[in-house]
Amino acid sequence: MAEADPKLAIPAPIIVKKVTIVEGGHHGGAWKVAYADFVTAMMAFFLLLWLLGATEEKQRKGIADYFAPTLVKMRQESAGADGLLGGSSLTDPDNYPNEMGQTGTRSITIPRGVTGGPSEGGGRGEMDAEKLKELRDKIEKKLVQRRQLKHLARQVRVMRAPEGIRIDLMDDADFSMFEIGTTILTREARGLLEVMAETLKDESAPLILRGHTDSLPWRGGVTANNWSLSTGRAEATRQALVLGGVAQKRFARIEGVAETEPLVADNPADPRNRRISMLLLDGRGTGGQRAAPPPKPGAPR
C-alpha cells in the first residue's frame, strides 16, 4: 500500500480552555455577610446579659410593666402584687446598686416631674422602694408583736401608687373591718388601726383615706347607700388614726367611692372589695388640700 501523503493529513483540533476567576475564594463573599450577622447577634446577646446583670428585679419588672397597655389601671388594681409589697412602676425613682461605676450618671427610666436619677433629677424623692420595704417591715413587726393580730398580716397590702404609697386594709370571708352595713369598727379592726397609727404617726406625708364597699344591695326600706357607707367608714378610720396619734393636719382628703373601684373586678360582691385605702402622698400629689369634713347623717352626697 502506498504511504499517505503528509500534506493531506488532518490537523489536530485546537482546544480553548476558559478559566473564570471568582474573587474572594471558592464560595465567594457570602460567608462574610453571614459571619457579620453572627458577630452582631452575639454582641447583642452579650449586651443583653450585661443589662440583666446591671439592673435589679424590681427595675426589670418596672420595664415590663411599662410596655403593658393599661399600666396605670393595672397598678391601681394591684396587678402583679399579691403580698404586702407590690410591684414597682417604671416611674419609680432610680435605685441602682452601682450608680457611678456601672450604670453611669444618666437615668434610664422616665422621670416624674423634675425628679429623676440620684445625680440628675435632684434626689430619690420621699417615697421609693426603700420606703415601701421599711413600711412593710414595720407593719409586719408590730403585728407579730401583738400575737392576737398576727393573722391580720394577710389583710394588709403595701404597694406603690402614682401619687405615693398605698396601704390597703381588706376584708375577706373570715375578717371584716366594720360591722355589717355600719360604720362601727370591729374589735380586731381597732387593733389593726392602732398598729397603723403607730406606724404612720411619725411620718410627714399627707394622707388620703378612701372607703370601698362591695356591690351587695341593701335590704328594702333602708335609706342608706354604699356612697354614704363608704364615706362614713373612711371617716371612722380617720378618727381611729387620730386617736392613735396621727396628727389631724396630715389628712388631705376623706373619700367614699362605694363599689365603683372593685379590687376583684370580675366579682363585685367579693368581700375583698370591702376595704380602706390609705394613700401617703409623696409631695407631687394633692398634699396641699384640706381634709373633707365628717359626713353628716342624712346629708346629700
Image (tube, rainbow, N blue to C red):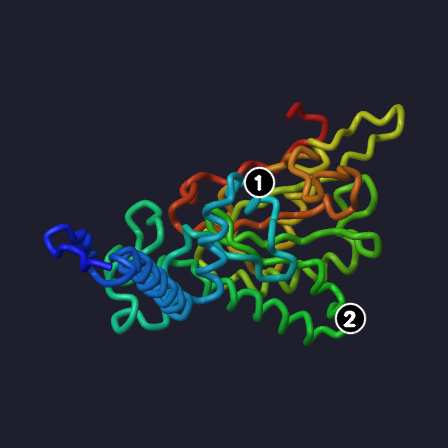
In the image, is residue 190 above or below residue 114?
below
Residue at the front extreme of this rendering: 1
Left or right relative to 211: residue 50: left
| Residue 148 - label | 2
Residue at screen point 67% across, 46% down: 236
Picture coordinates of residue 104, whole percent (x, y): 25, 66
Q: Dot 1, crowdedness within 10 Å: few (<14), some or many (≥20)?
A: many
Q: Residue at image x 51%, y 39%?
A: 69
Query: Could you say which disc has been placed on residue 254 in the image?
Result: 1
**Number of marks drawn:** 2
Decide if residue 95 is in sight here.
Answer: no
Classify residue 32 by image quadrant.
Answer: bottom left
Residue drawn where x is 20% and y is 58% of the image: 2
In this orientation, which residue lies closer to the viewer: 24 or 233? 24
142 in relation to 15, above or below = below
Residues under labels 1 and 2: Cα distance? 29 Å
**Percent from the top left, x then y, of residue 35?**
31, 62
Position of the N terminus by quadrant: bottom left
Residue found at the far left of this picture: 7
Please tell me which of labels 1 and 2 falls first in the chain: 2
Which residue is drawn at the image coordinates 14% and 50% (left, top)?
Answer: 8
Q: Is residue 213 above or below residue 78?
A: above
- Between 278 and 49, which is closer to the camera in this rendering? 49
Q: Secondary structure at mark 1?
A: strand
Q: Amino acid at mark 1?
A: Ile
Please indicate whether residue 204 sits to the left or right of residue 194 in the image.
left
Q: Identity of the amino acid at label 2?
A: Gln
Q: Would you say the residues marked 1 and 2 are in contact, meaning their CB atoms lie under 8 Å apart?
A: no
Q: Is residue 230 above or below residue 11?
A: above
Residue 13 position in % (x across, y down):
19, 52
Residue at the far right in the pictured view:
220
